[in-house]
Image (tube, rainbow, N blue to C red):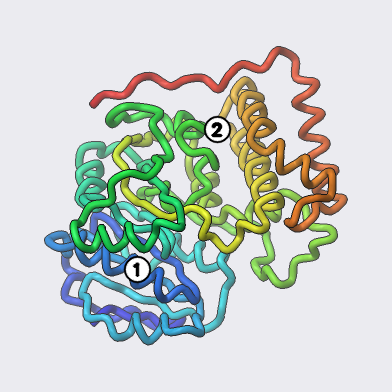
Amino acid sequence: MPVVHNGDTERRASSADTMPLKLTVYIPTYNRYEKLKNCLDIIAREIAGLEHSVRVFVSDNCSTDATAAYLDALQQPWLEVRHNPRNLGAYGNILQCFSLPLTTDFIWMIGDDDYLMPGALSGILDLIEQYPSANYIFCNTKAFPTEHSAAIMQHYRDTGEADGGIAKSRKYVGTVLVEFEKIIDPTIADTLLAELMCNCFRQASVRLTDDGVDRDHDAIDWDSVGLDSLGKLYAPQLLPLLQSFQANTHAVYCDTVRTFNFWGSAEWLGNYDFVFPILLSYLIQQYRARGFISEQKFFGLLEYYYHSMGPALQRQAAGTSRARPFNTQIKAELYELAIQYLTRPVATPAVAAAPAAST
């Protein structure tokens, strides 16, 4: 039986508690039973033989579909389940990753619609052993068109293979130990590490402190909320890393793809023109303010921002976007950011290339 946490109840012992855990896979979920089932079915295949080193922790955010009953019926000793007594919102459920009731070397957070590639778990365990000074591992991912999802999932079940798709990152070839600053690169992750499945971190190296944000998404005053509050709400998985890491924190980049998913299936896509211009501008400014990147790289990332978010910003300005419109506060802050870019002291260089990796 899985270890089950109901709210703040004490964790009961399992037979695996005496074994040191190398990796915990954390999966926040809410009302996506079918996707979660696919995710855990694949994990069950991949975790075979690694049960004493790997734990899977699913945090159910008070789902109202079949999720809770499904999780409670599973007979997997490597699985731990937490049933939140109330819905914490995606923000709160994700942040619980940083206060787990277990001790593990590394934590890897993935979505319930992210599916492990063959050898994903064993590959990360190998990296943990090979790079003892690393506090962060970048986990490459790839995507397939949504319309091909049924055929690809069936092929995976039949063969254990998921060939094709478009990989997120081919910045390096092979594996390399670099400073965390080098990972903040749109050619590595176009969302600048804002996707759950890309981030694997050493549990002991990360702390969670109060961010001063009201986590009740339903209580947001959309007419006055600013970039800082929304940036935190849209990227809670990065807040403890921003609080805990430094530019020179040791990080592992590996070009091996660890997960796959299907683009076009996310529920928030209709709000893309609101979420992503805010999210990326928030992260770029945070990386600068916290000393992760130089002024030169800051302006290089802004150049990338205006190139990639230009169409979304234009639709917002023209009032033709189907997304939530920017309020006056957001417009003012984005305007100030544009002024900084336009009045930069020198011509903006390209984001600096990182050194070649070893294979």
Q: CA distance from mark 1 to mark 2?
A: 30 Å
Rendered-image quadrant of the C terminus? top left
| Relative height, residue 230 to residue 77 (above, below) | above
User: Looking at the image, is mark 1 or mark 2 nearer the viewer?
Assistant: 1
- Crowding around mark 2 (Cα neighbors within 10 Å: few <14, some 14 to 19, many 20+) is many
- 50 to 246, vertically: above or below: below
Which residue shows up at 16% across the image and 59% down it? 50
User: Residue 295 appears at what percent x and percent y?
Assistant: 64, 23
Q: In front: 240, or 153?
A: 153
Q: Residues within 10 Å of mark 1 (few under 14, many from 20)?
A: many
Q: Is residue 137 left or right of residue 239?
A: left
Q: Residue furthest right?
A: 328
Query: Residue at left 62%, top 20%?
Result: 296
Q: Using the rendered view, name the quadrant where residue 129 is placed.
A: top left
Determine whether 152 is above or below 348 in the image. below
Residue of label 1: 57
